[in-house]
Image (tube, rainbow, N blue to C red):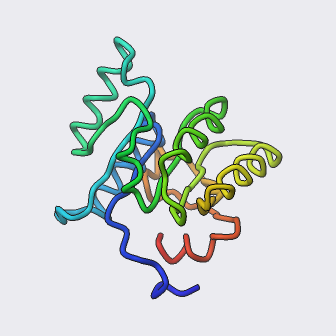
């Protein structure tokens, strides 16, 4: 597949607005969205409703300039690419919740630290809905490299994902 086969993605979502999610989302806002009002970024973090953490997450989203939701709503269906950066324990739950509202062909970058069997299980579940699962392995720290952390990607949609990245 070539980049000519990739429709212009006008909305991206980040699942999880912790350290890595914030770094990725900040980088997307600066390098991808820039000042283009037709490009949207949505962040989803289920901790948004927490007293202390929720307020900090909302403040981060406002500082970055992105929409924030506390649940996996239909707004996610606009996303052509999703970066899932939640805790390993929540990775499958987040993927399945997002799968229910994402459109077939959405690039789903799984940035979570998981075992091979966990990754294969989530990939299989996403494929049932036509979601293009991409295993994303960071080769450094988001705290030091931000969104420019070196990475490896794999999966059936890796070539398409690489053309997007």
- Position of 75 relative to 93 (above/below): below
Task: Say above or below: 136 vs 53.
Answer: below
Residue situated furthest top in the rendering: 51
Quadrant placement of the N terminus: bottom right
Viewer-side residue, 77 vs 94: 77
Residue in view at x 41 percent, y 46 percent: 23
Q: Position of residue 42 (x, y in %)?
A: 33, 46
Q: Identify which residue is drawn at 70% across, 65% down.
A: 155
Spot occupied by residue 116 in the image (x, y as percentages of width and height): 81, 49
Residue at image coords 44%, 37%: 72
x and y, in percent, of residue 71 in the image: 42, 32
Query: Residue 104 sits in which quadrant?
Result: bottom right
Q: Is residue 131 left or right of residue 54?
A: right
> Residue placed at 46% from the left, 47% from the top?
144
Horizontal side, residue 47 vs residue 122: left or right: left
Q: Is residue 114 above or below residue 140?
A: above
Which residue is more in the foreground, 8 or 152?
A: 8
Tell me residue 107's x, y (percent): 53, 62
Badge count: 0
Q: Is 61 left or right of 102, judged from the image as shown? A: left
| Residue 128 image-quadrant placement | bottom right
As displayed, is residue 73 above or below residue 99? Answer: above
């Amino acid at each position: 597949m070539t980049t000519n086969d990739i429709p212009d993605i006008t909305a991206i979502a980040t699942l999880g607005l912790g350290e890595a999610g914030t770094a990725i989302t900040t980088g997307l806002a600066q390098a991808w969205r820039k000042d283009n009002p037709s490009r949207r970024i949505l962040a989803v973090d289920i901790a948004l409703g927490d007293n202390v953490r929720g307020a900090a997450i909302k403040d981060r989203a406002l500082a970055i300039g992105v929409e924030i939701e506390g649940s996996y709503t239909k707004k996610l269906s606009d996303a052509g690419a999703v970066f899932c950066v939640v805790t390993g324990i929540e990775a499958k739950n987040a993927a399945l919740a997002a799968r229910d509202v994402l459109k077939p062909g959405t690039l789903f970058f799984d940035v979570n630290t998981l075992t091979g069997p966990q990754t294969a299980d989530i990939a299989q579940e996403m494929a049932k809905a036509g979601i293009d699962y991409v295993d994303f392995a960071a080769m450094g720290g988001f705290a030091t490299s931000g969104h420019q952390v070196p990475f490896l990607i794999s999966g059936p949609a890796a070539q398409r994902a690489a053309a997007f990245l």
